[in-house]
Image: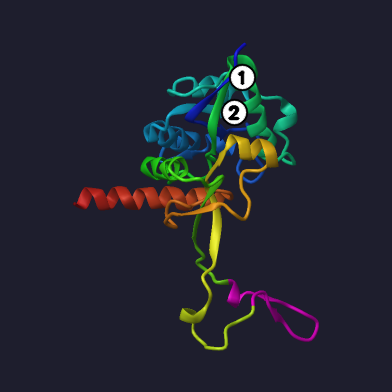
Amino acid sequence: MKIASSKNECLTVIPAKGTSVAIPRKNMALLDGKPLLEFTVMAAVEAAIPGRICLSTEDRSIHDFALQYPIEIPFLRPDTLSHKSVSVLPVIEHALDWYEVNQGYKPEFIALLQITNPFRRSETIRRAYEHMKTSDVQCLISVNKVQHHPCEYIVPGEEKFEFVMPRPRKTGRQNFPEVLFINGTIYMARVEFFRKHGRLYDETAMLFHIGVDEAFDIDEPEDLELANWLIGKRMARQKQV
C-alpha cells in the first residue's frame, strides 16, 4: 500500500477507555443528560479541521454507542493500552500506526482531545489548528493563567515552611511573575515531531491561551456535579435574555 503524507491534515484522537477510578465509566457519565464523550466528539466535528477524527477505545459498548456520531471508530484498541498505568502517548502511537498500516494515511498533524474537558469550543479547536498550520512551530499546548499563584504555595518543614517559588521583593500579587497552567484541553503536534521525540510537546511549544471556563476538567465526582450546575446556570441565564 502506498503511503503518502497528507499535508495540512490532522488526525484528532479522542481516547475513551471504559474504566475509570473516581467516577465509574467516566467517559459515559451524564452531563446535562448526555454522555460526557458527546461534548468532545461534537466539538471536534464542528471544528471541521481537515483530516479525520478517531475515537480510540477498548470498550465494545462505547465503540458501538459512538457509531452514531460522524467520526471514525475503526478498531478496538488492545487492552494493554487501557490500563490506568498506561499514558495516552502509546494510545496516540497506536492510532497513527493503525491508519498508516491499514489505510496508508499519514497526516501532518496529530491532535489530542480528552473527554474530561467538555467545555472547549469548536472555534477554539479550529483556532489552535490554524495557529499550527500557519506557523513553523512543532507543537502546541493550551494554557491558562493560574487561579492560585505558586508564590503563595508553601512546603511545611519541621521548624519552618518554605515557599515553593521565590517571592518578589515588592509585595502584592500584581508583582508576581506570570505563571501559566497546562490545562490539557488541547494538544497538537506535527506527526514528525511526535514520532521523533515520543511526546506531544516540549519547552518550545506554542502556548495557546484559553479561558478558565474552557479549561474545566472533570476528574472527581464533585467536578461532574459542578459541571452540571454550571450548565444549569447557563441555561437559566439564556432563558432570561
Determine whether label 1 and label 2 are within 8 Å by CB. Answer: yes
Q: Is residue 70 above or below residue 23?
A: above
Horizontal side of residue 221 vs 20, given as left or right: left
The residue carrying mark 1 is: 75
Horizontal side of residue 178 vs 57, given as left or right: left
Q: Position of residue 168 (x, y in %)?
A: 57, 83
Q: Is residue 98 above or below residue 31?
A: above
The residue carrying mark 2 is: 56
Query: Which residue appears farthest toward the right when viewing the image?
Result: 158
Q: Is residue 172 above or below residue 148?
A: below
Residue at coordinates 20% horizontally, 52% vertically from top-left?
240
Residue at coordinates 67% horizontally, 74% vertically from top-left?
164
Residue at coordinates 42% horizontally, 54% vertically from top-left?
213
Span colored in magenta: 150-165
Whole-angstrom CA distance, mark 1 to mark 2, is: 7 Å
**Three-letter amino acid code at the position of disc 2:** Ser
Q: Is residue 220 magenta?
A: no
